[in-house]
Image: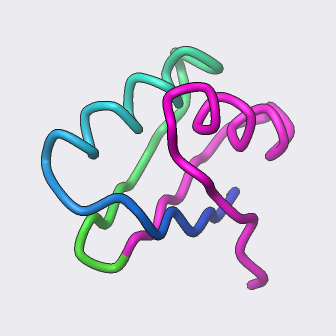
Amino acid sequence: MIRLDVPRMTSEKCRAAVMGALMGVDPRARCDIDVDNGHVAVDSKFPPSDFVEALEEVGYTSFIAQV
């Protein structure tokens, strides 16, 4: 499970943009997006850096969360 902090994610529009970016990396990924707290959990075999890069491409800075 990959956990990302996405601090500027604040609305349902943000959720849709983030989901689109994540699905662009891995269409089979399972994603849980917590807009209120700015957290994303992704179940995928792709490396976390691919998701960070995809989020940056749509305008969101993200950080790999320490679990």
> Which of the two residues, 12 or 23, is positioned nearer the viewer here?
12
Does residue 66 sit above or below 61 in this rendering? below
Does residue 32 sit above or below 15 in this rendering? below
Q: For the N terminus, give its image quadrant.
A: bottom right
Image coordinates for residue 65, horizontal then vertical, percent: 71, 75
Q: Which residues are magenta?
A: 38-67
User: Residue at the location (38% across, 54% down)?
Assistant: 32
> How many numbered discs, if any?
0
Image coordinates for residue 34, horizontal then vertical, percent: 31, 66
User: Residue at the location (79% across, 34% down)?
Assistant: 45
Protein image colouring: rainbow
In the displayed orientation, state which residue is furthest to the left.
12
Drawn side of residue 62 relative to residue 28, left or right: right
Image coordinates for residue 42, horizontal then vertical, percent: 57, 48
- Picture quadrant of residue 47: top right
Does residue 34 sit above or below 53 in this rendering? below
- Picture quadrant of residue 24: top right
Drawn side of residue 12 relative to residue 16, left or right: left
Q: Is residue 50 magenta?
A: yes
> Which of the two residues, 67 or 7, is positioned nearer the viewer here?
7
Drawn side of residue 3 relative to residue 17, left or right: right
In the displayed orientation, state which residue is furthest to the front.
59
Q: Is residue 33 magenta?
A: no
User: Residue at the location (74% across, 84% down)?
Assistant: 67
Image coordinates for residue 38, horizontal then vertical, percent: 40, 70
User: Residue at the location (35% across, 56% down)?
Assistant: 33
